[in-house]
Amino acid sequence: MNGLRTALPPYARAVSDMLAEEGVMPTSGLSATAAAERLARYGRNELPSPPPTPAWLRFLAQFHDPLTGLLLVATLISFIAWLIEREEPVPFEAITILAIVLLNGVLGFAQESRAEQAVSALKAMSAPSARLLRDGTQQLIPSAEVVPGDLLLIEEGDTLPADARVIESISLRVAESALTGESSPVSKDVAAIPGEVSIGDRQNMVFAGTAVASGRGRALVTATGSASEIGKIAGSLQQAEDETTPLQKELDYVGKLLGVVVIVIAVVMSATIVLVDHVRDISELVDVLLLGVSLAVAAVPEGLTAITTIVLSLGMQRMARRNVIVRKLAAVETLGSTTVICSDKTGTLTRNEMTVRTLITAGGRVDLTGIGYEPTGDLLHVGAPLADPVLHDEVKKTLRAANLANNAGLLQQDDGRWAIQGDPTEGAILVAARKAGLSEAELSIRFPRVGELPFTSERKLMSTTHADAARSERLIVFSKGAP
């Protein structure tokens, strides 16, 4: 069981009651020890996957198409004919056809096995992650290690790793079409909902596999893995069958057509000889049948499957040299018709680190040196260190506003590397502010936040309201986003 066991469903309970029962502080989340204990109790946050196909079954799958079956039948017939006639010391024709079929199977099996190993390695590298609160600090951990009782930190663009009860909502809206079919994002709040309601009406719950459309918030994980709503659906569905590629359809058609043709050839030739020559003797009848079968076997293109596999293997190798992994040989031909590929390149083709390179104010343009999240670099104006005090003041005011209208955090890890907590764009702004000599801690003391209007795709802005410690009667609104 991968979920919290309670008398009432999570959506019907008050936030304070759930936090108290789970022993979770809203400001610190679970401890590392408690999280490890729950991971052992509830299991990993993963949907059950089908058992891996044994190697011998994957090898046999190389021979399932009709054309290969026709070649195997031809091999058997050639061997039977050799046993009857014994004109040669060994059945060369049967051995040749069988060798071609086996070589074709071994080649296809080897190529696909190599691709599967590469895909498994890539999956391990690009495992999804979740941002949550543990031991009082924001942490980014693999989604598979999220446990019931964890406090998720939710922001726009996140894909939720588990079912969770919302405990804080700042204009939080979640797109749940993948789960409920509802096209419009659903607004989320923290109020308990009495009675029994459907998934689509649980406005204080968020669900695994859904995406945050706008706003931000926090949520207490209530169910993971197969106990989540998406996990229940996955458990009731059978594994989808692989779709047949156009090339496989063509080869299947050719194989079936050739099967009919060779049978017709054998029957017509044998019947014609029997009728024309008035064959009555059993030995002569056997010779006629062997002749018809031999003609039929000769009509089978033994090299077609081997040539097809070799050509596709060469295509797979050429794709591999361009860092493209093709899992199934037959998919190489399908890729030839591809015009557009949509891919998430973050963290694979790119570093998953953003850097502010240029600032433009009313006074001019300023370039920033340094790459990544390490807060070291210089401010340059026209290729030289920034010396204009007026322009420097404008830059600091700009970065101060962007720093305060910001929910990210910047920290140095144990290995000395710098990392951000939260949105990468906001993290890059914090790094730029550090380069300009601004400190988040000092700014938060001088300008404590008293309100927030989060970024939405409609406004394209994030606005925060701050008090001014130097002038207690004044409130300041800082906005960051599109003009």
Image (cartoon, helix red, strand yellow):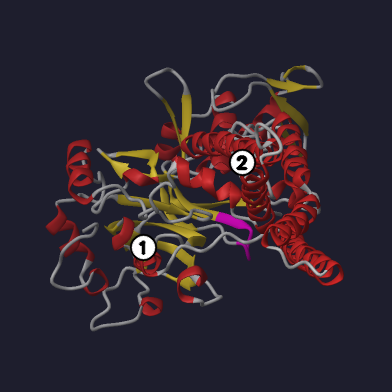
Instruction: Give x and y (percent) for residue 394.
Output: 68, 35
> What is the magenta range?
457-462
Up-down relation of residue 452 to residue 9 (above or below): above
Residue 352 seen: no
Q: Quadrant of residue 306?
A: top right
Q: Residue furthest right?
A: 276
Disc sitting over residue 105 in the figure: 2
Q: Position of residue 69 (x, y in %)?
A: 63, 54
Q: Amino acid at mark 1?
A: Gly
Q: Amino acid at mark 2?
A: Gly
> Residue shown at 48%/55% (left/top)?
159
Residue 126 x/y as whole percent = 51, 39
* Residue most extreme to the front: 281
Tell which of 225 and 26 is nearer to you. Answer: 225
Q: Earlier in the sequence, mark 2 or mark 1?
A: 2
Where is residue 425? Give x, y as percent.
59, 41
Q: Quadrant of residue 100?
A: top right
* Residue occupying the point 65% across, 19% down: 378
User: Do the numbered discs 2 and 1 sit on residues whose CB atoms are within 8 Å?
Assistant: no
Residue 292 is covered by the magenta coloring: no
Front-most of 317 and 426? 317
Q: CA distance from mark 2 to mark 1?
A: 37 Å
- Badge 1 is on which residue? 231
Left or right: residue 272 compared with residue 480: right
Secondary structure at numbered mark 2: helix
Q: How many marks?
A: 2
* 61, 465: nearer the viewer: 61
Judged by its main secondary structure, the magenta piece is loop
The image quadrant of residue 442 is top left
Task: Say what secondary structure mark 1 lies in.
Answer: helix
Identify the residue at image location x=73%, y=68%: 280
